[in-house]
Image (cartoon, rainbow, N blue to C red):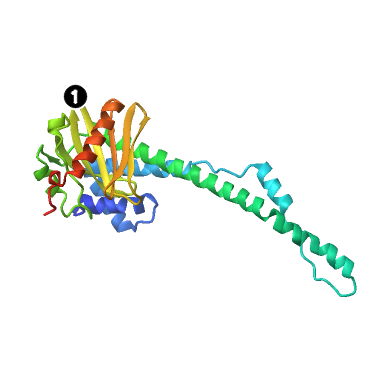
Amino acid sequence: MNTMNCEEALQLLPVYGDGELELPRALELERHVESCAACAAALRSQRALSRAVRSAPYHRAPDALRARLRAQLPLPAETPTAAAPSLTRARQRPRRDWSRWAMPIAASLALAVGLNFMLATQRSQDSLREELIAGHVRSLQVAHLSDVISTDQHTVKPWFNGKLDYAPPVRDLAQQDFPLLGGRLDYIAHRQVAALIYGSRKHTINLYIWPAKDGELAPNSQGSEGYNLVHWRHDGMEYWAVSDLNVQELRHFAELQIAAGADKTANVPNS
């Protein structure tokens, strides 16, 4: 009998994807995935992410930079003797030269490290965008747009209680022509996150929310695979809005979310 629920399954997916889940739990997870379309979709997303990480290119330092750094390394130091003071002074010259090259070498190393960090960050952001778009498309295709269907923020916000380790802000923007349609749990960046669903005429907006690790960030727009994304951080939360809505309207939606967050009456207390 399959007793595993969705919350347990989503927590085990990363371990299962790495092949490190013990056999009894792996079999139980597989039985659950066979009968749960949402968790099966999350597993496909997890596998796609793992493939993307494994196939990410390794960026080797340019040969010219490697050669320049090797040429600037000091000669091996030798132990001076009292019998040859002139030879001792000659052997000490490379040590004095080392101090002259210390700053250029340090700057080159810092540049190389910074370049690799920038490339790794870019790959991580690309992977996250792909996950968000996949989640948006999946929600429209598998009839799993909402776990809770309601236009009432007082109904949607309490639904998340006990399902997440944080309380996502839920705002009503119906008067600004972005009505709340519901909410659901999704699996993004190796964790469960809140997804709020809004409408705009015939378009659907998925707003993904999870706790932020960094400070405030003004809305910035990006496009990929025919979809628009707007990303911002506000009041301790990370926000990603995804839709086929045009980018100007999606940015306006983000600005309305921030403005509503400044109005504390727009947030419902977490009961």
Q: Is residue 102 left or right of residue 44?
A: right
Q: Which residue is mark 1?
A: 202
Which residue occupies 35% across, 54% down?
15
Which residue occupies 36% across, 28% down?
225
SS at mark 1?
loop
Q: Is residue 265 left or right of residue 129?
A: left
Location of residue 64 in the rendering, given as x and y in whole percent from the top left corner: 68, 42
Q: Quadrant of the C terminus?
A: bottom left
**Closest to the observer: 234 or 151?**
234
**Closest to the observer: 84 or 200?**
84
Total of numbered circles in the picture?
Answer: 1
Q: Quadrant of the N terminus?
A: bottom left
Does residue 144 appear anywhere in the picture?
A: no
Which residue occupies 35% across, 56% down?
21
Does residue 191 appear anywhere in the picture?
A: yes
Position of residue 83 relative to residue 184, above or below, is below
**Closest to the observer: 9 or 223?**
223
Quadrant hosting residue 75: bottom right
Q: Is residue 123 left or right of residue 236?
A: right
Q: Is residue 245 left or right of residue 105?
A: left
Location of residue 45 in the rendering, given as x and y in whole percent from the top left corner: 33, 41
Q: Given the image, on which type of amino acid does mark 1 rest? A: Lys
Quadrant hosting residue 229: top left
Location of residue 154 in the rendering, given as x and y in whole percent from the top left corner: 9, 45
Location of residue 255 in the rendering, given as x and y in whole percent from the top left corner: 25, 35
Which residue occupies 28% across, 53% down?
11
